[in-house]
Image (spheres, rainbow, N blue to C red):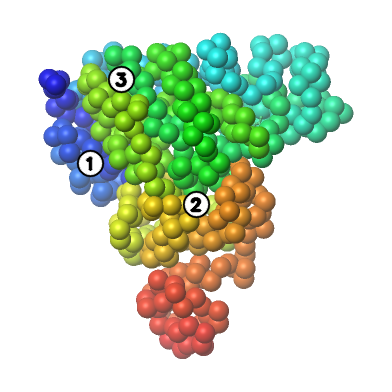
């Protein structure tokens, strides 16, 4: 088949691991890359990997990675054909996609119109309902007076959820278990939504029992062809932040997979979707599934789909944006084995999981068969308060779920990050949990099993204490006596500190 010319030069409007991921995709395709970076990112990996790197100045997001005018100006000056937005920042900003279009630069993603449509949760739901994609029963109407909402609530029945239309991340969300609490919940939700989002529109939904977050990856070319690349289960979240994703989902069967895949393709076709996207569903305890929203970007968790299908999503995004036809056929796409992703964050469990800021004294990623580390960090790098504290994504692949869980536990145990506190011990505990192993991974998993997860130093799991101790030993000149009585003999850090397992050690 005749191949269209791909772009000559692409600007990556992002930072961290995703900028690195996209640069690598461009390099494989023979495309030149332009990185942008704020002052605190001048030594970041994406800056070194790209062919050109242009400074954005002040590190505050508004002045750097969120600054449309600055980025467009740089893109024009560098003479790029296209911009890849990554995820976060401007990835789902229709104004940015439009500014690219107006400057004759291809935005690697869907059209501004589709981004805008999916960005409005109510419009998106209505569009999907019309297209015949199941949505959660509820009230998503424009009338917002108490009378209308109370009536709608009674009709839906209890328990129900009051959600902020503008919200995400569970803000303004209230579970109501009986009619007598409805009015108060509506009023609280409106108040919170107004103060958080400047908009007090709410909607009401039947509260789903034992819900799971299961999303479908789709690819759509600019010639009306749409395919799906199966599911990812992302139910393991902490405060609405995904931390572990896996595919295939343990509850999936071939019939449900086909139905949900078809619904995802239908959703994309209904809006004339182009490029890579994700259709999010909630699946209840009885395997009913409902459209939640569509993400119009490459997602953080895309690697698990890449490992189980063998398809490079970042490269396809670029090929599709350059006008290439999808050569993949739905029936040729297969899912093989099992993949898990763990998001490694610099956050401090001693301090309510707040971002842990500091210099990464030592970074050593695990390595081995079917272990992938998508990272934007290196030894000596500073973790600043300006951006999301995700350090890297550890992804493993194995023949089946149970072997893969063991592989991921091994990989996490051999991931050394010293200098800041990370959630690695927490991730390990989740993977070791019997209910996780059994696949009882509803969206309430973390609340159910890790609600009181140690937030005090005293209660920290031993490997967290060890990593802190190693850090201390590398930095304190004092001859402290440290006691690590229950030290884990299998800890990867055991050789690094001047201490011994199960003994009192003088340094
Ligand atoms: C729900 C739900 C149960 N029933 N909607 C949380 C934030 C937003 N993305 C939607 N969320 C939920 N909506 C109905 N009708 C349970 C959740 C939910 C959740 C969803 C996905 C991932 C993690 C979650 C954690 C708690 C609650």
- Describe residue 110's horizontal placement relative to residue 216 as left or right: left
Q: Nearer the viewer, residue 224 or 238?
A: 224
Q: Residue at x 17, y 25 (%)?
A: 7
Residue under label 3, please give it: 221
Picture quarter with ligand 1: top right
The picture quadrant where one finds residue 485 is bottom right
- Taking depth in this image into account, of 127 and 467 the one nearest to the observer is 127
For residue 144, say whether it is visible: yes
Crowdedness near tag 1: few (<14), some (14–19) or many (≥20) residues, C-alpha within 10 Å: some
Residues at marks 1 and 2, CA–CA distance in whole angstroms: 28 Å
**Who's the residue at 37% across and 24% down the image?**
227
Left or right relative to 118: residue 25: left
**The N terminus is located in which quarter?**
top left
Q: Secondary structure at mark 2?
A: strand
Which label sits on residue 344?
none
**Residue farthest to the right?**
180
Residue occupied by mark 2: 355
């Amino acid at each position: 088949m005749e191949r269209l010319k791909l772009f000559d030069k692409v600007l990556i409007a992002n930072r961290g691991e995703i900028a690195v991921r996209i640069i690598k995709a461009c390099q494989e395709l023979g495309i030149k890359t332009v990185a942008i970076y704020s002052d605190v990112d001048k030594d970041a990996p994406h800056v070194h990997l790209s062919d050109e790197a242009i400074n954005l100045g002040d590190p505050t997001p508004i002045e750097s990675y969120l600054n449309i005018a600055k980025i467009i100006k740089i893109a024009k000056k560098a003479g790029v054909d296209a911009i890849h937005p990554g995820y976060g920042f401007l990835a789902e900003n229709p104004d940015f996609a439009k500014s690219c279009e107006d400057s004759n630069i291809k935005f690697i993603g869907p059209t501004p119109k589709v981004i805008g449509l999916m960005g409005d949760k109510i419009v998106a739901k209505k569009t999907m309902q019309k297209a015949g994609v199941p949505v959660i029963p509820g009230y998503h109407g424009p009338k917002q007076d108490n009378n209308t909402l109370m009536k709608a609530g009674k009709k839906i029945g209890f328990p129900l959820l009051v959600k902020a239309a503008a919200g995400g991340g569970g803000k303004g969300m209230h579970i109501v278990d009986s009619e007598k609490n409805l009015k108060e919940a509506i009023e609280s939700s409106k108040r919170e939504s107004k103060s958080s989002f400047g908009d007090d529109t709410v909607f009401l939904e039947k509260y789903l029992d034992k819900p799971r977050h299961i999303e479908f990856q789709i690819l759509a070319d600019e010639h009306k062809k749409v395919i799906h690349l199966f599911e990812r289960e992302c139910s393991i979240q902490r405060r609405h932040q995904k931390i572990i994703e896996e595919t295939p989902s343990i509850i999936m069967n071939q019939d449900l997979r086909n139905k949900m895949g078809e619904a995802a393709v239908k959703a994309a076709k209904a809006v004339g979707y182009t490029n890579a996207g994700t259709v999010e569903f909630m699946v209840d305890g009885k395997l009913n599934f409902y459209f939640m929203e569509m993400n119009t970007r490459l997602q953080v968790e895309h690697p698990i789909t890449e490992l189980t299908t063998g398809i490079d999503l970042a490269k396809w995004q670029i090929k599709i944006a350059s006008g290439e036809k999808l050569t993949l056929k739905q029936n040729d796409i297969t899912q093989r084995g099992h993949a898990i992703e763990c998001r490694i964050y610099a956050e401090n469990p001693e301090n309510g999981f707040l971002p842990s800021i500091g210099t990464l004294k030592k970074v050593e990623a695990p390595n081995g068969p079917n272990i992938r580390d998508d990272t934007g960090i290196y030894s000596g790098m500073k973790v600043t308060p300006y951006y999301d504290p995700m350090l890297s994504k550890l992804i493993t692949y194995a023949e089946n779920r149970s072997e893969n869980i063991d592989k991921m536990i091994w990989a996490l145990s051999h991931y050394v990050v010293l200098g800041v506190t990370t959630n690695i011990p927490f991730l390990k505990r989740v993977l070791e949990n019997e209910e996780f192993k059994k696949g009882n991974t509803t969206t309430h998993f973390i609340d159910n099993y890790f609600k009181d997860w140690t937030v005090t130093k005293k209660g920290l799991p031993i490997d967290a204490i060890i990593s802190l101790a190693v850090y201390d030993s590398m930095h304190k000149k004092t001859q402290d006596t440290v006691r690590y009585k229950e030290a884990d003999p299998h800890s990867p850090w055991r050789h690094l500190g001047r201490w011994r397992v199960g003994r009192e050690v003088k340094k």
